[in-house]
Image (cartoon, rainbow, N blue to C red):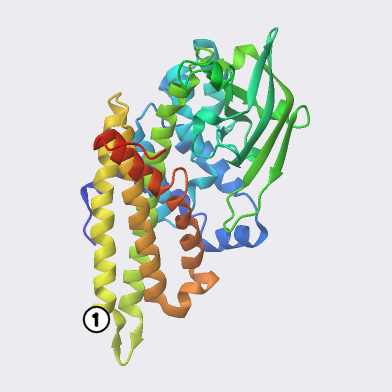
């Protein structure tokens, strides 16, 4: 299969990721899936070999590369049949600390994150009553001397049990007392090692995929005031860049998933023979695979564009949203096509198709649902009246 321009970017980096992922074949992920275990060995290897620190400046021990490079890493992870969901937050939460953290905070945390000794894997935003309406979060941090006291609840927080640090979004001023709904929101950097059992309770949530998802409960959790990122009350705009990065990186994972499904379907269609000839000779099999490739290629261009805008210091909210929507839909079409191409074998654990099918379905919903992306484009780009 000829390479697209997207695949040709960062060739050495991509080859390095492929070599690493070859150490973690489908049997590794199947075993984890059966036991609902976190891929500690995979994440540790990613970290120790420097793949999770590509965005950290060289002065702190990272590679000093941009989001485009991080996207290439995660795309190759997913194309190889692995899953970056266990570790990708370290990349997109990094922007909040890099862009808005104090020199002291960067010096304290970034070198250990870059070396893999410290994991920044948890991003505490969503709550049961607010969902995607982030301005309505209720988790509240009250200043008490040199600490904040945090009370509230978060849900769908991935990797909380496997992270040393969490970027936590809280209210420091009630919404009704603010001039704008997005005012009065702050960002705290929480040390999970000290917090669990001292005001923080983590409850795992079992889901249809092995994603280490949890619910968090805060009861007078003490967080040092020095762990406030940026200014109090200005945190909403700080996390917007993190959210844009998250959507772009997850879109890159979806491109990797789509490539995985297209690769597997193409290979199977060439070798599987029914009625005396390869099934890939039949246009009924050929055309869905080809359509999946066309859709994936177009979506990859949008992901590249959004990442480039981010790397040049812009706030590509619309482009990040569109990239995530197009890539997630391309990966879902490819997933369905791949199962159909394999027939009954698509449901067999040993082929890895059904596992990746479940994994890629998540991105129609998270980190933002398709309908909310369409609402953003309708109101922010086309000027249509808001429906909520």
Can residue 9 be seen from the camera position used here?
Answer: no
In the rendered image, residue 240, in percent from the top left (x then y), is placed at 42, 28
- Residue located farthest toward the right when viewing the structure as drawn: 197
Q: Is residue 112 above or below residue 81?
A: above
Question: Which residue is at a point 38% across and 26% down the rendered structure image?
Answer: 64
In the rendered image, residue 19, in percent from the top left (x then y), is placed at 43, 51
Q: In the image, 284: left or right of 221?
A: left
In the rendered image, residue 222, in percent from the top left (x then y), is placed at 72, 19
Tag 1: Cα neighbours inside 10 Å, few (<14), some, or many (≥20)?
Answer: few
Q: Nearer the viewer, residue 166 or 119?
A: 166
Q: Is residue 106 above or below residue 289?
A: above
Question: Which residue is at a point 30% across and 82% down the rendered structure image?
Answer: 279
Can residue 94 be seen from the camera position used here?
Answer: yes
**Disc 1 on helix, strand or loop?**
helix
> Could you say which quadrant of the image residue 148 lies in?
top right
Q: Where does label 1 land, which residue?
A: 281
Position of the N terminus by quadrant: bottom left
Q: Is residue 144 above or below residue 88?
A: above
Question: Which residue is at a point 31% across and 70% down the rendered structure image?
Answer: 266
Q: Nearer the viewer, residue 263 or 322?
A: 322
Position of the C terminus by quadrant: top left
Q: In the image, 310: left or right of 154?
A: left
């Amino acid at each position: 299969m000829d390479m697209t321009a997207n695949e040709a970017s960062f060739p050495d980096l991509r080859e390095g990721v492929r070599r690493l992922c070859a150490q973690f074949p489908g049997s590794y992920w199947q075993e984890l899936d059966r036991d609902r275990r976190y891929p500690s060995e995979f994440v540790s290897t990613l970290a120790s070999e420097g793949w999770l620190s590509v965005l950290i400046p060289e002065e702190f021990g990272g590679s000093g590369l941009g989001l485009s490079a991080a996207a290439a890493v995660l795309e190759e992870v997913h194309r190889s049949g692995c899953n970056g969901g266990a570790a990708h937050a370290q990349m997109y939460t990094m922007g909040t600390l890099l862009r808005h953290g104090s020199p002291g905070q960067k010096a304290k945390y970034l070198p250990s994150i870059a070396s893999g000794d410290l994991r920044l894997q948890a991003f505490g935003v969503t709550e049961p009553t607010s969902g995607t309406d982030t301005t309505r979060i209720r988790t509240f941090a009250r200043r008490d001397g040199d600490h904040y006291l945090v009370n509230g609840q978060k849900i769908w927080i991935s990797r909380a049990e496997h992270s040393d640090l969490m970027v936590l979004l809280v209210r420091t001023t009630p919404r009704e007392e603010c001039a704008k709904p997005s005012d009065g929101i702050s960002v705290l950097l929480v040390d999970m090692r000290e917090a669990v059992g001292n005001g923080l309770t983590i409850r795992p949530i079992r889901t249809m995929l092995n994603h280490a998802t949890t619910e968090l409960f805060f009861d007078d959790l003490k967080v040092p005031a020095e762990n406030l990122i940026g200014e109090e009350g200005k945190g909403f705009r700080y996390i917007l860049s993190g959210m844009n990065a998250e959507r772009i990186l997850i879109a890159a994972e979806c491109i990797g998933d789509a490539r995985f499904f297209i690769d597997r379907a193409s290979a199977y269609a060439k070798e599987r023979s029914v009625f005396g000839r390869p099934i890939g000779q039949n246009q009924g099999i050929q055309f869905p695979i080809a359509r999946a490739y066309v859709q994936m290629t177009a979506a990859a261009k949008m992901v590249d564009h959004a990442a480039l805008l981010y790397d040049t210091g812009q706030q590509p909210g619309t482009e990040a949203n569109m990239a995530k929507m197009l890539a997630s839909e391309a990966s879902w079409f490819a997933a369905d096509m791949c199962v159909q191409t394999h027939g009954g074998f698509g449901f067999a654990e040993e082929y890895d198709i059904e596992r990746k099918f479940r994994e890629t379905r998540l991105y129609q919903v998270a980190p933002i649902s398709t309908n909310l992306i369409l609402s953003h484009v309708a109101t922010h780009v086309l000027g249509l009246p808001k429906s909520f």
